[in-house]
Image (tube, rainbow, N blue to C red):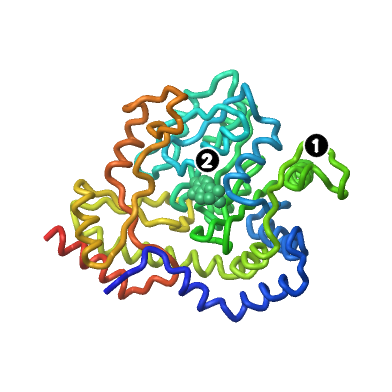
Amino acid sequence: MQVPFIDLKAQFANLESELMPAIRQVLEQTNFILGKPVEEFEKAFAAYSECDHAIGVASGLDAIKLALRALDIGPGDEVITAANTFIATVLGISAAGAKPVLVDIDEPTYNLDPKLVAAAITPQTKAIMPVHLYGQPADMEPLLELARHHGLAIIEDASQAHGARYQGRRVGSFGAVSAFSLYPGKNLGAYGDGGVITTRNPELAEKIAVMRNYGSKVKYYHLLKGENSRLDTLHAAVCGVKLKHLDEGNAKRRENARLYTEKLSTIPEIRTPFIRPDVEHVFHLYVIRVPDRENLMAYLKDKGVPTIIHYPIPIHLQEAYQDEGWTAGQFPLTEKCADEIVSLPMFPELSPEQIDYVTDCIADYYK
Ligand SMILES: *Cc1c(COP(=O)(O)O)cnc(C)c1O
């Protein structure tokens, strides 16, 4: 059997009859930039995220950068975030001109540890950026308390967690501003690059909408030095269709995760994902930990099961960030996880038979 890591073709086949008319309409109306589907998607995504406002932008990275810019966070300011994240979180902070301050993770959840965040706050700190990694919300309550106490902004990087809930509330509704990616492989994905920002604050929403469009509200009148970071109408139309199926897709991901965990928890070498009791995890990724990763991955590859490491080199050890002076050993849990994690195939259309095959292969390997 050959199991794909992710199957966007299966998703398209299921949604083709809804997607094609939506795409066709954009082509016929030729409203490629900030057309009506953008506004419609923004409204729908705001409601979905239990927020008042959503603004479509060109990518998840831009969403993070624009969120910071909208809050006037830039040169001289520090933003605290998790050492264990996709590099775009930290690149977004750098792109805004601010200094990323990394903290290590809470081992069972892989999300940033609020106790370490408290210790990292300095007079230059302006914001805390939790990342809801792999689809599991970070522990927001202590972070919100810290932010209130120190007068800091919370900016969520919810790029891997569209639809996830923490204590009953949707991610993206906790931060002053929150950033989502609409990269094709994300739980809600466009057919190209895209991103979306949510906020409850109408002034910030207005400022971001202006900033993403050359700083302009009325054509050729420029209020500020903006950027070109608009969500294309075509992608907004696609995401508008897919948003209607997001809860269903997330429920299937959760069920797939349940099946994986049921089968894998009988194998002593494997540590299956920990789920906080107060969250609804949306399993963007299903990540296990094993002691002898390379051999297992090679064995599974031979059996037609692709696996990926998210992420093999922590940010503080990346060449791009040598100038920060971070050192090996500085974030020990992040480094330990980076050496042991393996992501198994995960997408809504994954079948119980495919999951059985993957878990049988893993069981055979450890026999
Ligand atoms: C995907 C991702 C991003 C960046 O998104 P792009 O749309 O690729 O720019 C940011 N943060 C996290 C945690 C991500 O997974």
Above-or-below relation of 335 to 186? above
Left or right: where 304 falls relative to 205: left
In the picture of the structure, the residue carrying the numbered disc 1 is 224
- Name the residue tied to disc 2: 89
Crowding near the residue tagged with mark 2, few <14, some 14–19, many ≥20 C-alpha atoms within 10 Å? many
Q: Position of residue 4 (x, y in %)?
A: 36, 67
Indicate left or right for 174 with 209 as reference: left
Tell me which corner region of the image, top left, top right, bottom left or bottom right, holds residue 107: top left
For the residue carrying disc 1, how many other residues have a C-alpha within 10 Å: few (<14), some (14-19), or many (20+)? few
Percent of width and height locating residue 34: 76, 58
Give the image location of residue 217, x and y in percent. 84, 47
Residue 126 position (above or below residue 16): above
Answer with left or right where residue 122 lies relative to residue 214: left
Asked if ligand 1 lies within 8 A of label 1, the reply is: no
Identified at 47% across, 68% down, the residue is: 8
Closer to the camera: disc 1 or disc 2? 1
- SS of the residue under disc 1: loop
Amino acid type of the residue that numbered disc 1 sits on in the rendered structure: Leu
From mark 1 to mark 2, how far is it between C-alphas?
A: 25 Å
Whether the residue under disc 2 has CB within 8 Å of ligand 1: yes
Farthest-out residue, top: 123
101 sits left or right of 50 in the view: left
Residue extending furthest bottom? 17
- Viewer-nearest residue: 139 or 26: 26
Viewer-side residue, 178 vs 3 = 3
Looking at the image, which residue is at 61% across and 75% down? 19
Residue 296 appears in the picture as rendered: yes
Q: Residue at 67% x, 51% y: name it.
A: 57
Q: Quadrant of the C terminus?
A: bottom left
List x then y, in percent, for residue 65. Answer: 62, 39
Q: Confirm whether residue 166 shows in the render.
A: no
